[in-house]
Image (cartoon, rainbow, N blue to C red):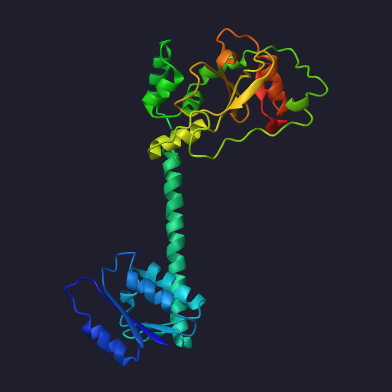
Amino acid sequence: MLLGYARVSTRDQNLGRQLDLLTAAACSRIFQEKLSGKNAERPELRKCLEFARPNDTITVTELWRLGRNLQDLIAIVGDLRRREIGFKSLHEALDTTTPGGRLVFHVFAALGEFIREMIVQGTREGLDAARARGARLGRPPAMTTEQVQHARDLLGNPDNTVSSIARLLGVSRATIYKYVPELSSPALRVAAAPLELPEAAGTHGTANEPLPVPTPPHARACPTCRHRPSSKHELQLHREGLETVWLLPDPAQPATAVVERWHCERCQPHQARIIMCDMCGSTVMLGGELAAVDAKYESDAVVLWLAGRGWTRRGEHWMCGQHQ
């Protein structure tokens, strides 16, 4: 079946000449639209391409009626060829169903490949030049130097909490801890003596057979306070907050056991300490009495929880189970 496609750029222009030529070319069905070729979304062209079946031929009066540019034209005709659909342009006498037409298409494809390689080469040269000038490439930092200094200044006031500073700067608590590493120093002042664990720790696991590290919940609502974020920005902070597991004293046996909790920005404990892996930055947050500022040692319950999930201590530093 011969299918026709006619297009003009503005509504004031007339499709009559194209329709007459496509009708004379014996096109059984003609798709037509009045839309500029610079638009990537052309509904009638999409319908025409979707309607075509193997052994059909799509016909246009001029090449530029089909593609916005050479690359767009090559992409469309290449897709048609993969689907075993022919393409014909009346003005250029191009017909991909004939050997001569296929030769012309190969020339177009070679030009397209050349253009793509030139774009890649130009991009690489631009990146190399930017690196030589000292430009920072990649994702921008979550906090600027001024914001980091502002956070440090605010932390000097004991009335300010990490949560309130994070909300003020529009970032998560985890981001504050990442860019202000001195906040984690209290959690690293632990006893340097080697850790002695019982041969079997029961439900706490053992160093040889660690339990899997708990994964954050995937629900949109906070599992602790049930808050649901109302904006895209708040949702991002919400998800970042739930990526970190919190350890709190077990209400049933606060002196000997801990419970795992996940908190969003709204319900995170004001008093917190951080245990961070020196190798990859993985964190575990301590809340409540476990986060006492004057605590010199980690409680036995916290140590057993960490060791049961593969964490080890080297001198005054912790490493998670990924770096055994």
**Image position of 317 (left or right of 166):** right
Q: Which residue is drawn at 57% across and 7% down?
A: 294
Quadrant housing residue 185? top right
Q: Is residue 58 above or below residue 35?
A: below
Whether residue 206 is visible, yes or no, is no
Residue name at image x 48 percent, y 32 percent: 226
Q: Where is residue 312 in the image (x, y as percent from the top left)?
A: 71, 24
Residue 16, picture quadrant: bottom left
Of residues 311 and 135, the one nearer the viewer is: 311
Q: Measuring from the top left, give residue 150's x and y in whole percent.
A: 38, 20
Q: Which residue lies furthest to the right in this view?
A: 199
Q: Nearer the viewer, residue 153 or 267?
A: 267
Q: Position of residue 214 (x, y in %)?
A: 64, 33
- Residue 43: horizontal and vertical position, in percent? 33, 69
| Residue beneath the point at 43% across and 68% down | 112
Please tell me in which quadrant of the rendered image residue 262 appears: top right
User: As displayed, is residue 41 above or below residue 32?
Assistant: above
Query: Which quadrant would the N terminus be assigned to in this image?
Result: bottom left
Q: In this view, does 96 lie to the left or right of 190?
A: left
Give the answer, above or below, for where 149 lies relative to 89: above
